[in-house]
Image (spheres, grey):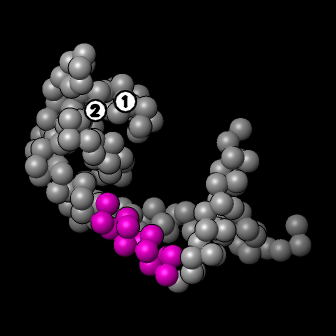
Amino acid sequence: MSKSAAGSTLYRLIEAGHLARQALLAPLAARGLEPGDDAVLLGLAAAGGATLEALADFTGLGADHLSARLARLEDRGLLLRLAVGPEMEPGARLSQQGHLMRQAIEEHWKHLEDTLAEDLGHKRTKHLRKGLKRIVQLLSF
């Protein structure tokens, strides 16, 4: 490799991903939440909530990890565990406080996205998004 590792495209991609995740974790830490709690809150965006199966698919968490996380978020008053959907399957939905928390996380995410888009411009942002999608496809083996 002619470039140093720190100057490589892969290193820059890892660095950017790490910094983006740190920026997205800031509102979680400020509210006493843990990394990954945002995925659960975002996965429960629908007013009727989501089944445990759908939430596990959305978050990528196994049943044990998901159950523990839901219990902790329920103890914090952010969600209610109950039967959802037409089949009344085990699931959860956000409480009013949970909806406010999800909304704050989404607004923070949108602010970061808008700042990036503003700095890069529409055309470069579109190219970056397409390029990153292709990288994800190539690395998903």
Image quadrant of residue 88?
A: top left
Image quadrant of residue 123?
A: bottom right
In the rendered view, would you say 120 is above or below 38? below
Q: Could you give the CA–CA distance between mark 2 and mark 1, rounded to whole angstroms? A: 6 Å
Q: In the rendered image, is residue 72 in sight?
A: no
Check disc 2: other Cα within 10 Å, few if <14, some if 14-19, many if 20+.
Answer: many
Which amino acid type corresponds to the residue marked 1 in the rendered image? Ala
Q: Are marks 2 and 1 in contact (CB under 8 Å)?
A: yes
What's the residue at 49%, 81% (across, down)?
Answer: 118
On the rendered structure, is 92 left or right of 112?
left
What's the residue at 24%, 59% (across, down)?
Answer: 103
Query: Magenta part mainly helix, strand or loop?
Result: helix
What's the residue at 65%, 50% (across, down)?
Answer: 136
Write the start and end of the magenta stretch as one range: 106-118
Indicate the position of residue 138 as horizontal and vertical percent values: 73, 47
Indicate the position of residue 125 as horizontal and vertical percent values: 59, 72
Of the 4 image quadrants, the one containing the C terminus is top right
In the rendered view, would you say 75 is above or below 18? above
On the rendered structure, is 18 left or right of 91?
right
Of the 4 image quadrants, the one containing the N terminus is bottom right
SS state under label 2: strand
Image quadrant of residue 81?
A: top left
Indicate the position of residue 7 as horizontal and vertical percent values: 74, 75
In the rendered view, would you say 120 is above or below 140? below
Q: In the rendered image, is residue 10 in sight?
A: yes
Check disc 1: other Cα within 10 Å, few if <14, some if 14-19, many if 20+.
Answer: some
SS state under label 1: helix
Residue corresponding to mark 1: 54
Residue corresponding to mark 2: 50
Indicate the position of residue 63 as horizontal and vertical percent values: 36, 25
